[in-house]
Amino acid sequence: MGDWKTITVPVLSSDSKNILSYTSERKISPTSMNSQVLRFSLPSSKNMHSFFSAFCTEENIEQSISYIDRELTTLGFPSIYAESKGKELNLVSIINCMNELLALQHKNLRAQEEVEMQHMKLGSDMDHLQNCYAKLKDQLELSKREIVGLQERDRQLQSKNRNLHQLLKNEKDEVQKLQNIISSRATQYNHDMKRKEREYNKLKERLHQLVMNKKDKKIAMEILNCVGRADGKRGAWRTDKTEARNEEEMYKVLLSDYEQRQKQLLLENAELKKVLQQMKKDIISLLPPQKQKPKEKSEDGLVLSDQEEDIGELNKENMWELSCETVREQLTNSIRKQWRMLKNHVEKLDNQVSRGHSGALNEKDVISREDHELETEKLELEIQQCKEMIKTQQQLLQQQLTCDDDTTLLLQDCYLLEERERLQEEWRLFREQKKNFEKERKSFTEAAIRLGLERKAFEEDRGAWLKHQFLTMTADCKSENATTPSAFLRSKYLVQIMFLHSSEPDIRLVKSASRQRKPPSVLSTPVSAETCQYIAQNSVASEKPAADNLPNLWVESDDKEETE
Amino acid sequence: ASCVQHRLVVRDASSLQLLQLYTCLDQIQYIEWSSDSLFILCALYKRGIVQVWSLEQPAWHCRIDEGSAGLVASCWSPDGRHILNTTEFHLRITVWSLCTKSVSYIKYPKACQQGVVFTKDGRYMAVAERRDCKDFISIFVCSNWQLLRHFDTETQDLSGIEWAPNGCVLAAWDTCLEYKVLLYSLDGRLLSSFRAYEWPLGVKSIAWSPSSQFLAIGSFDEKVRILNHVTWKKITELDHPATIASKKTIVYKEVEKSPTVDTERLSFPPTRELASSLFSTQSKYDISQVPVSLQYVKPVADRANPKVGVGMLAFSADNCFLATKNDNIPNAVWIWDIRKLKLSVVLEQLCTIQCFQWDPCQPRLAVCTGTSRVYLWSPAGCVVVQVPGEGDFQIVSLSWHSSGDSMVLLSKDNFCVCYLEREEV
């Protein structure tokens, strides 16, 4: 539009003092014309009048009218003059123009208001923004300061870290150095030790030579008499043979130790293998029964073949004793497989349980459900069977309770009769056995009596024979003079004879007599020594009471066997 | 048998009745019975003489004089008829035979903790030797003293050797500066070598289990490592910490019991036994609640042979228990159950443990700590036994009878025999 400038209308100069800064007149003009800004506002009532009177006075009506007309036409309003030339004013057009002007005025006022509003808004926005800006600037400052502080700290920490690393490296270096020092010192000490030891050895050698050279009679052993060796044997010369024998013995000792250890290990191995087999069986039995589900078929197939194999293996007992690599590996592998399957099975069950609680069903559950159903069927069958059993039992009970007295009595009688018959049978058997025992006892007593008689006869015989012996021996004794062990034994022998003559005859002596009869004629000392021993044993045994002969006959004969 | 100055006194073991009295030339330093209990050797180190007495024939005598060679150690051979004398400076070992009056020499024996060991059955003897700054082991056959095997060991400085009870394996261990345990078979082959760590101080003590199944190695790092006889590898490490936290361990603590005296029965002047009972402190065992912290002694860092580490190891006769003593915790005996390889019992005493020994027949452990009390432990429980008598009887060491029925308690000047009753079944 145009420029808003304050204007002092020079034409109406008389009341220019009254024209306050706020009075303005809208002036639209091209640039060459008045460069004056008009500020439009509602003038005060006083000034309005003066203003109005200032523009148009009675003198310059024509001029002002023409001026106004010019202005209006330039604004696009129709002219206020009438169409005919002259100075007649078109009132209508004047009023229209005025109306138009008023409308314009209103519009402009409104626009101004709006603009002022906007201006105020913008002003407040601007304030707000300025505040924000100020705050943000403060924040920025703060954060910058913080950043600087943190960077400082970071730097400090890094430097500390570097210091610590450095320290660590230093320590490590020191440790390494110390270790090197230690090892070098150790080698030095070793060297010194070796040197000192060599000197010492030289001294020892020297001393040794001196000691050996002296050959003073002092180094000697004075012993009253030589003592026999502990094991009674004589000392052996040291030869190559003995060396070889020593080696042999040493190796024997080692070998026996190794053999013992190996035996122990074999036993342990066998036990462990047994345990493993047992475990395998248990695991196989724990695994679920085979099903014809396609999913499980592969597994089943494997398990079946495995089971067959395993059963085949189990049947071959000699497999247990084999300890070659392949068998061992087979066993451990099969156990591992079974264990894995068991683990999977248990895991599946766990999953099922957890899922069963939550109620969700999967494809996997189908199988387990079948399991479950089978089990429930089985259980139901069992329950039915039990119920039936209970029913039958109840029936029987009822029968028992409610049946007639007669029938019960009869039944009882039947039982009693049965029992009585059985008892009678047993009595008969018992009596028969008793008779048999009596017969046996009689025969044994007869045998004992016979034996006693025989023994007496034998004793007499023996007495005669011993007397003969004694006589011959005393003859021999006179010829021998030295105290030899044989004579010693013979004297013992004689003592024994004396003793036995006084003791009661025993069955055992019968046996020894039979043995004695075998070498009766040989009088060499070893045999007599043997007989002495036998007799000594028997005399010792004869201490046992000979009174209880008969009932314990066969017990004593057992003892006899043992002493022989 | 016991020796007093220069006299040898032999008593009967069950009645302590004096049986024989022998007089030697000088003060006796060491006595040993022969394996068949027929002879006793008395070694007089200062004079370099060994005198042998016979029990069966008191008039019999034997004297072995080493002369200028001097005498440092003397022992019987397992057949009871040979005496091995180690001369001074470990110049040589002379083997004197009582049967044939013959002499044999073993050169270059090693001067170490345990240089001459015999197998349990007495067949073989192993001697540690050192020639030209290298260690060797020679194995001799005891019946005729023939050299069986002679081999070198890879040790720096062999510190000891020990036969396994089955006589087939020989364990050799190095000086404490190097942790190394070598296992040789009877024919001299190296079966295995074991090394737990490199630098710190090494092996302090070694013990075989009676079944030869385990070898327990006690080291200066307060741990016991057990090797098994099949692979000779470590099967477990037993640690000896100062605090015991496991609930399954029983801790028996020796507690002093104040003497209870009946005031009514006090008599004047006080009888001797009353006086002794007033002044001698009684003690008993209390079970401490776990966790227990034991008295830990920090060793002096500068000295050699520090009192650190597991210094005493012993297996029980039935192969079920292992008793150990950690020198850092000198008042406690640790008893481990071998079947479970776990710590089963800890005995905490008031004084330092001097010596402990297992009963040769049952799992019974006798402990002495230098007081006048001997402590017995068995899986059934433990008991404190006071040595009756006046005055102090400081038990320094003890030794069981081979039947397990009695044991000898030794103090500095006296000894007494403690008889254990058998339970009436």
Image (cartoon, helix red, strand yellow):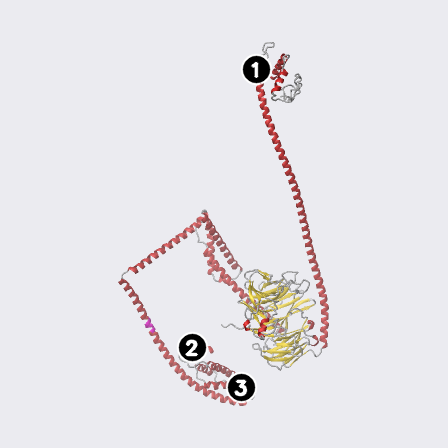
User: Do the CB atoms of the residues marked 2 and 1 lie less than 8 Å apart?
Assistant: no
Q: Chain of mark 3?
A: A
Q: Position of residue A349 (x, y in %)?
A: 46, 52
Toward the viewer: A269 or A308?
A: A269
Q: Position of residue B163 (x, y in %)?
A: 61, 68
Label 1 neighbourhood size at 10 Å, few (<14), some (14-19), many (20+)? few
Q: Is residue B285 above or below residue A70?
A: below
The span picked out in magenta is A426-430
Q: Chain of mark 2?
A: A
Residue position for label 2: A555
Who's the residue at 64% across and 37% down the image? A137
- Marks 2 and 1, the one that precedes in the sequence: 1
Residue position for label 1: A95
Give the SS element for disc 3.
Answer: helix
Q: Is residue B151 magenta?
A: no
Label 2 neighbourhood size at 10 Å, few (<14), some (14-19), many (20+)? few
Give the SS element for disc 2.
Answer: helix
- Marks 3 and 2, the one that precedes in the sequence: 3
- Marks 3 and 1, the one that precedes in the sequence: 1
Tell me the CA gap for discs 2 and 1.
171 Å
What type is the residue that disc 1 sits on?
A: Ile
Label 3 neighbourhood size at 10 Å, few (<14), some (14-19), many (20+)? some
Q: Name the image quarter holding residue A138.
A: top right
